Image (spheres, grey):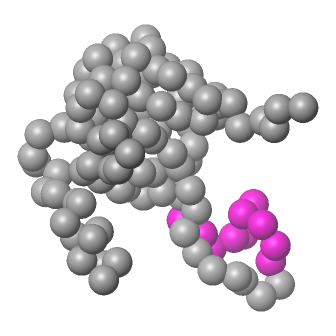
Amino acid sequence: MMLHKLRRAMVAPEREPLKREVEVDEFFVGGVEEGHEGRGPGAKKSLCAVAVEVRGRGSGRVRLSVLEDASWRSLGAFVEATTAAWTVVHTDGWPGYNGLRKAGYDHQPRSQRRRR
């Protein structure tokens, strides 16, 4: 069932870019590795990015990609390849997203720190 939902949400990359309001995040894919903790050097996990259109209380179209690293070069290229200019882009506070405003997006970072 989940696979069918993902197939419906994903569209061919040559179709029109995501627009209006989009949430972008990076994450690691990979399971538990014997003898290795975390995601540092030596881990066999893949860094990926996801962009999801915000549609009210639900989600719209989705774009996924494997990234080389979490730098502006990689994250910026992902956003530019998947998202229309002038779109509102919500991210966490990761510095790799800092170039979005300069690249023509309405960047709205959200801090992940707990409020005290």
Question: Is the residue 32 above or below the residue 39 in the image?
Answer: below
As drawn, 100 above or below 8 = above
Q: Which residues are magenta?
A: 36-46
Q: Residue furthest front?
A: 57
Asked if residue 48 lies left or right of residue 61, the reply is: right
Quadrant including the C terminus: top right
Q: Position of residue 2 (x, y in %)?
A: 34, 78
Q: Position of residue 82 (x, y in %)?
A: 27, 40
Report the side of 43 relative to 29 (left or right).
Answer: right
Residue 112 in sight from this viewpoint: yes
Residue 20 placement: quadrant: top left
Closest to the observer, 68 or 53 = 53
| 76 is within the stretch colored magenta | no
Residue at the farthest right position: 116
Residue at image position (23%, 38%) is 18
Q: Does the image show residue 72?
A: no
Q: Work out whether residue 74 or residue 108 is closer to the camera in this orientation and state it.
A: 108
Residue sticking out furthest to the left: 15
Which of these two is toward me, 92 or 32?
A: 92
* Quarter of the figure that contains the N terminus: bottom left
| x then y, percent, for residue 88 | 37, 24
Q: Quadrant of residue 96?
A: top right
Residue 62 percent coordinates (x, y):
30, 53
- Name the residue located 19 percent from the left edge and 37 percent from the top edge: 17
Report the residue at 60% width, 35% height from top. Answer: 92
Residue 99, above or below 30: above
Q: Residue at x 77, y 88 (%)?
A: 34
Membership of 37 in magenta stretch: yes
**Residue lying at the far bottom of the rendered structure:** 34
Q: How many marks?
A: 0
Majority SS type along the magenta span: loop
